[in-house]
Amino acid sequence: MSDSGLAGKIRELEERIDRLEGKCNSLTMVLFSGDFDKAMAAFIIANGALAMGKEVTIFVTFWGLDVIKKPAFSTSGRGFLERILLWVRPKGPNRLAVSKMNYGGIGPRLFRYMMGRKRVEPLAALISMAMEFGVRIVACQMSMELLGIKKDDLIDGVEVGGVAAFLGKAYEGQATLFI
Amino acid sequence: MARIELDFRGMNCPMPIMKTAMAVRKAAAGDQFEITCDDPGFEPDIIAWCKETKNRLDGIRKQGNDIVAAITKS
């Protein structure tokens, strides 16, 4: 092989190694649940991965969208059923129910009180910290459409995407979680 | 080379590791950190963090209920 051919081959191999190493460098998550406790787990893992220098993408779908809603927004321009849905579903991290021991809303209050006493970071702070660290949050277009949620109802900095966007990221990385 | 002391006592997972990452990110290569933490999970966490981020873990010692980790930014 000629010198230039060899140099080209080396360059090609270097690029392949870079690509392979890049594969260990991302974490993809699906946040399907809108439960407070599960969202806590999702954002603790996301923050840990970000601290480790990983690229983190969270695809938020269905009930998970409750987690990234703004605490208040107008439901104008939505149909009757969408309005009811938006009215009954919690808006944002401070309104979520817990997956166990919810007791009609007493459970989340109790957990938040205990978290405060034990100095566990609140969910809202974990979300804004992850945003600061550069997490990518992609909201599922189809569930938004179904549940009558508009992009402006969600916290700033959220992107909107579909299943292919999620799969593209998932195939790129080595770790994918469904929460 | 700077020597930086960090006190993360009273914090819970994932805060000590987040705060460590933030501080180390701002520092220069070769800067040394001494991190004090009373979260029992901090020991395995900082070992994994250093390994993954390729910063050097110079040592971990126990001081009463606290864990003190010495790391150097690479």
Image (tube, coloured by chain):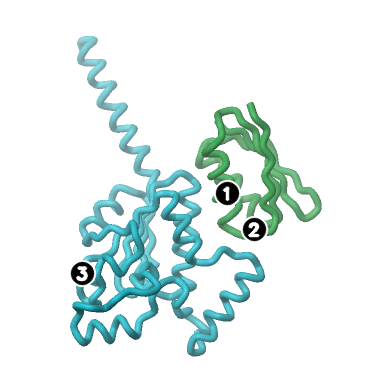
Q: Quadrant of residue B50?
A: top right
CA distance separating discs 3 and 1:
36 Å
Residue at image coords 21%, 61%? A162
| Chain letter corresponding to the colour green | B
Viewer-proximal residue among A162 and B58: A162
Looking at marks 2 and 1 on the same chain, the residue that comes earlier in the sequence is marked by 2
Q: Chain of mark 3?
A: A
Please determine if labels 2 and 1 lie on a single subunit: yes
Q: Whole-percent x and y of residue B32?
A: 65, 33
Please determine if labels 3 and 1 lie on a single subunit: no
Per the rendering, the mark at residue A142 is 3
Q: Is B58 drawn above or below residue B44 in the view shown?
A: above
Q: Amino acid at mark 1?
A: Lys
Viewer-proximal residue among A19 and A37: A37
Q: Outermost residue, bottom direction?
A: A104
Q: Whole-percent x and y of residue B68?
A: 72, 45
Secondary structure, mark 2, is loop
Q: Whole-percent x and y of residue B28?
A: 55, 30
Q: Is A83 drawn above or below residue B14 in the view shown?
A: below
Residue at image coords 39%, 44%? A24
- Which quadrant is home to the C terminus of chain A? bottom left
Per the rendering, the mark at residue A48 is none
Q: Amino acid at mark 3?
A: Met
What residue does disc 2 label?
B11
